[in-house]
Amino acid sequence: MDDGAGGEMETYTTYEEYLDSQVTETDMFFLESEDLARQLVELGYRGSGDTLKREEFEARKRALRERSSQKTNVPKQLSSMGKDISDSPLLQALQAREELVRNGKLTTIIFIRDRNAKGQEVSGYIDYALRLKTENFEPYFEKRKKIMPKPSDLSYFNWETQTSTSNSTPNFQVIADNETGLLFKNKRDRKVINVDPTAKTPGDNSTRTEIKTTEYLQAVLYDHMTRRKS
C-alpha cells in the first residue's frame, strides 16, 4: 500500500489518531473501549485490513517531514491574493480564512443555499479545506464562478428533486442519523459541530457566522479551531 495511505499521512499527528480514523461508530458502540478498538485496527481486524504498523507509520511521517522541509523556502500562492473582492462579503470572509485553512490551523464548513443553473433551489455544506486542495479556487475569487454545493460535498440537497447526499471527508465525519439533525465530527480532535441554527452554540472551539450577502440566498460559515493533542 503506497501513497494512497501516504497521501493522507499528513492528516494524522500521531499513530493513535491514524488508528482512530479507522474506528467506526459501530465499533465504539459494541466495544466501548477506545484502546481495544485501536488494538483491533492495528491487528488488521477492523478498518481497511491494510493498517500500517507503528514503525511504518513513523517512517512515513519522517519522510513527509523531510520532504516538507525541502519545500519550506517555496512560498505558496494564495488563490485570493491580489483579487478585487470588495463587493463580495462571502469572498472577503473566505479570503480572511484561506491561509489558516490551508496550513491546517482552522477548518471551515461553508453552507450555501442558492439556485443552480436550472433554477432549482439547492443547499449544502462544503469542506473548504478539501475544496482548496482539490480545486483551483482562483476562478471563484475572480468571480468567474459561483461557489455552489455539489453531490460530492459533505452534504447536498436539491429541494425540487428531493435528492440528498452526504460524504465524509479527510477532515470531517458526517453524522446524519440522529435526533438533533445533521452533525459533523472533526477527525483531528473528534469535536462535534452542530449546524442547527437554533442551537445556542455549534460546539467546542466552533463559531457560526452568517454572511450578509445578495450573491446567494443564504451563506453561513462554521469555523472550528482544532487543538492538536500534545
Image (cartoon, rainbow, N blue to C red):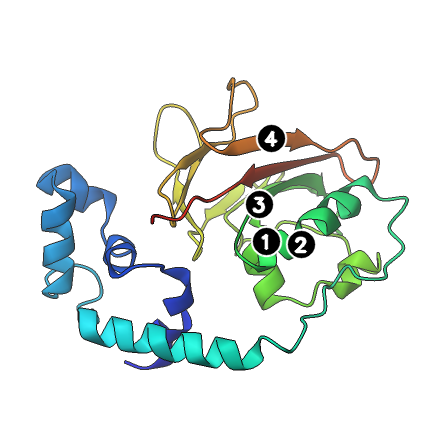
Q: Do the residues labelled 1 and 4 touch (CB within 8 Å)?
A: no
Q: Which amino acid does label 4 sit on?
A: Arg
Camera-side residue of 144 and 104: 104
- Vertically, is 112 above or below 204? below
- Mark 1 vs mark 2, CA separation in Å: 5 Å
Q: Are marks 3 and 1 in contact (CB under 8 Å)?
A: yes
Return the x and y of residue 45 as percentages of the image width and height.
10, 61
Camera-side residue of 132 and 177: 132
Q: Which quadrant of the view contains residue 21?
A: bottom left
Return the x and y of residue 98 as percentages of the image width and height.
67, 54
Identify which residue is drawn at 63% across, 77% down.
Answer: 73
- Mark 1 vs mark 4, CA separation in Å: 16 Å
Q: Which amino acid does label 3 sit on?
A: Thr
Return the x and y of residue 196 as percentages of the image width and height.
52, 26
Residue 114 in the figure: left or right of residue 160: right
Residue 165 in the figure: left or right of residue 143: left
Mark 1 vs 4, N-terminal side: 1
User: Which numbered mark, 2 or 4, is in the foreground of this view?
Assistant: 2
Q: Which amino acid does label 2 sit on?
A: Glu
Q: Which quadrant of the view contains residue 123?
A: top right
- The residue at which mark 3 appears reads as 108
Q: What element carries label 3?
A: strand
- The residue at which mark 1 appears reads as 101
Residue 145 in sight from this viewpoint: yes
Q: Residues within 10 Å of mark 3 (few under 14, many from 20)?
A: many
User: Which numbered mark, 3 or 1, is in the foreground of this view?
Assistant: 1
Return the x and y of residue 172 as percentages of the image width and height.
43, 48
- The residue at which mark 2 appears reads as 98
